Amino acid sequence: MNLQNDSETLTDLTAGFDAALERLAQARTTDAKAPNSEVLEYAAALLARDGGPQALHARVPQIESAGVFAGTDWSRPRILRPALAVRSLRQGDLTQTAIEALSELRLLGVATGDYFHPGIASEQARHFLIQVMALNLDLLSGTLNEADRERPHGLGAAVQALYQYLLAHMGYESVLDSLVAEVWRVLGQRPIQVDDARQMVIQIATCLYDPDIEAATDNDDAARLVRSLFAPAPGCAEDPGLEAYAQRLLEMNAEALTAEATSFAKAMHDTGLVSVYQAAFIRHLRTLKDDFGDALIPTALGLSSTGHDALLCYQALVHSLIDEAVFAETSQAVYGLAQLLERGVLFSPPVAAGLWRQIRLKLSAETSENLRIAFGDAQPPRVFLLAGVLGLLGQPLGVGQGNNPTCQSVIGLSMWADNDPDYLLQLVAWAARDDEVLTRFEGERVSSRGLEAGLAKERPLDVDAVSLVLVPHLDRIYAEMWRLCGERDDDQHRWINPEFYGWWVGQGFRVVADIHTEKLDDYEGFIRQFYACYHPYYNGNMLVIHPQPAGIAVTDSAARYVGRHAITLRRVALDPNDEMRVYFFNPNNDSGQDWGQGVVTATQGNGEIHGEASLPIAQFASRLYVFHYDPLERGNPECVPADEVARIIELGKTSWAKEF
C-alpha cells in the first residue's frame, strides 16, 4: 500500500486493515513467524486519519487474536516500560511506532474495563498510560516539534492523534494535575530507578512554562517537583547549569554554603529525587581544605543523629564513597548513601569491609561491557555499579522487577539488602569480578557458571546496576535448584526458598492448591494456619522477625486471575486506624494496584514505610497462595473467627480461585 496516498478514505483504510488482519491470522495458523508488517502499515496510516484511532481501538480483540503482538515484547504487557514506549512512539520506525500504538490502544481497553488481558491488570495498564502521557506532555500544546514534523509517513501527526485520543478517553478533568499526582504516587514508593520519574518531571517543567498549555497554572505540587531537580537551593534557583554553579560555589561563604546544604537535604527527602546540583555541591565540600566542608556533609545529606553517628564512625569510608560514586551522572547515589547511613548498616563490621572491597573491585570485561551498554561512558562502569550498591543498601524496598521476569531473584536482592547486606556485597563481588556466583543446595555445590538461563532469557538492560550484574546469575541458580528438586510431593518452593534466600526462611510451608490437581486443598485450614502464624491476636503477639517470601494470586480490577507472583511478607501490625494490616514488598516497580472486590493495595497513608505495600489482613489473605512459617512457633488456628475465615474464602473463590 502507499502510505502517502491521502485519497484513501477511512472506510477504505479500515477495510484494508481488516483484510490484512484476516490474512495474518490465517498465515499464523501454519507459520508462527508470519510477518505482521502489512497490518502495521495499515495501522500507521489509520492513526493519522480522523476516526482512525477509534477504529483501531474497536478492533483490539481481533488484533490480539490475530497474533499481531505474538513473538514480540508487546506480547507481555506487564514487562513494558513507559520510557521505552516513548522511544518507540517518537523515535521508532513505522513498524515500531505502529505496534506500540496498537499496544497502547489495547492497554486503554484494559484500563477502562472494556477488554481483559490475562497478562496485565487494569490498574497497571492505567498507571502505564498515565506515565506515557507524562512523558509526552509536550504534545498537549498542539504544535509538533521539528523532529516530529519531519518523521516519514506522517508518523508525528499519527502519534499526536493517538495521544489526544488517549487523553480523551482516560477522562481527566485536569491532565497536568493527574500526571503530577502520578509522579508523586510513584516517588512516594522511593524507587531506586528514577529515570522515568525524572523524564516526567522534565516534561512537567516544559508544560508549566508553556503559555499555550492552559492546564499548566497554579500547580504547587508540580512546582515542587520541578524545583527539586532544577532549583533545589538558592545558589541554583534559576537553573544556571553545572559549570556556572561550580563557579558560584567557589565564591560562597560559610553562611551561604550552609543554606545550600539545608535546602538540598530538604528537597531530596521531600521527593526522593536528587538534583545534579546536589552532587556537585557535595563534591565541592570534599575539596574544602578546612573541617567546615566535612562538617557540612551530614547537613547536606539530611542525616538524623543515627546517620550522623554512623558517618562519624566511618568517616573515611563515607568520604571515599562520595569521591568514588557521587557524580552528576550518578547523583541519585546521594540519596542511597544518606539512607544507608540512616539505617545504621555500617555498624555491622562486615558491611564496612565489604564496601571497601567494592570501592577497589576490579570488574570483569563482561561486567564492564554490560554496564557500559546500559549506563554509557560518562563514568567508568565501576562507578555506576558502586552507585547502584549504595542505592540498594540504602533503599532495600526500592528495587524493582522492571523488564525482568524474575521476581524471586529481585525479592532476594531486597531481603539481603535489608536483612543480610554483607552477603549481598559478597554476591555482587563474585558476579562482577568473577562472572560466577556460588551457593549450595541440600549440601551440593551450585555455581551459576555454565548454567542455562532460567526465566530471564536475555540480560535486562533497563534495571538498576546491581540487578543488571547479579540477577542473571541468581535466575540461573534458582532454575538449577528447581531442577535438582526433581519430582517431589509438594511445591518445589518449599525446599528452594530456605536454601536460596537464607536460614531465616521458615521451614514450614503451606500452599493453597494441590500441586498435582491444581485444585484448592483445605482452603479453610490454609487461612486458619496463616492467621495462627502471622496474626498477632492468634500467634501470641509474635512479630515477623525476618522478612518471609510468599506467593500471591494476582487479579485485575475485575477480580479476574492474572497470575502468581512472588512477594516478601515484612510485618503484620495495626495501622493508624487500629486495623490489622499486612505490610509487604512487591518487586514490580509499582505496588499500588487494584485487585478487584475493593482489594486495593496501598502504598501511603496506612503506616507504610517507603516502598511497602499494605492491605487489611483479610484482603491480603484472600489473595495469598503460598507462605512459609516456623513450625515450632505456631498459634492456635481454632481461635480464628469462623466468619472471618468464611469472608476470606468467599473473596478468594469469587476471584482468582475460580481458576482452581
Image: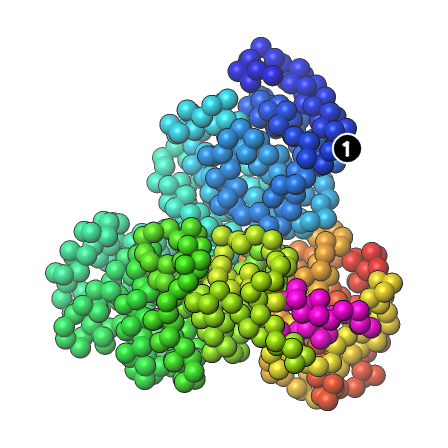
Name the residue type under label 1. Thr
The magenta segment: 478-500
Does any portion of residue 649 appear in the rendered image? Answer: no
Residue count near mark 1 (Cα–Cα under 10 Å), binned few <14, some 14–19, many ≥20? few
Q: How is the image coloured?
A: rainbow
Relative to 300, is 175 on the left or the right?
right
Label 1, on which residue? Answer: 30
Residue furthest out toward the top:
7
Residue 597, above or below 118: below
Find numbered disc 1 in the image and state the secondary structure of the residue it sits on: loop
> Residue 633, position in %: x, y?
71, 88
Residue drawn where x is 37% and y is 59% of the image: 381
Question: Is 387 inside the magenta-drawn segment?
Answer: no
Does any portion of residue 525 appear in the rendered image? Answer: yes
Residue drawn where x is 67% and y is 69% of the image: 481
Residue 57, above or below 652: above
Relative to 332, is 320 on the left or the right?
left
> Residue 434, position in %: x, y?
46, 67
Q: Indicate the quadrant containing the C terminus: top left, top right, bottom left or bottom right.
A: bottom right
Residue 537, above or below 484: below
The front one of 363 and 139 is 363
Residue drawn where x is 36% and y is 35% of the image: 211
Q: Indicate the quadrant containing the N terminus: top left, top right, bottom left or bottom right.
A: top right
Residue drawn where x is 74% and y is 29% of the image: 27
Question: Is 495 inside the magenta-drawn segment?
Answer: yes
> Residue 336, position in %: x, y?
40, 67
Question: Which quadrant would residue 288 be assigned to in this image?
Answer: bottom left
> Does the magenta stretch mainly form a helix, a strand or a loop?
helix
> Residue 648, position in %: x, y?
79, 68
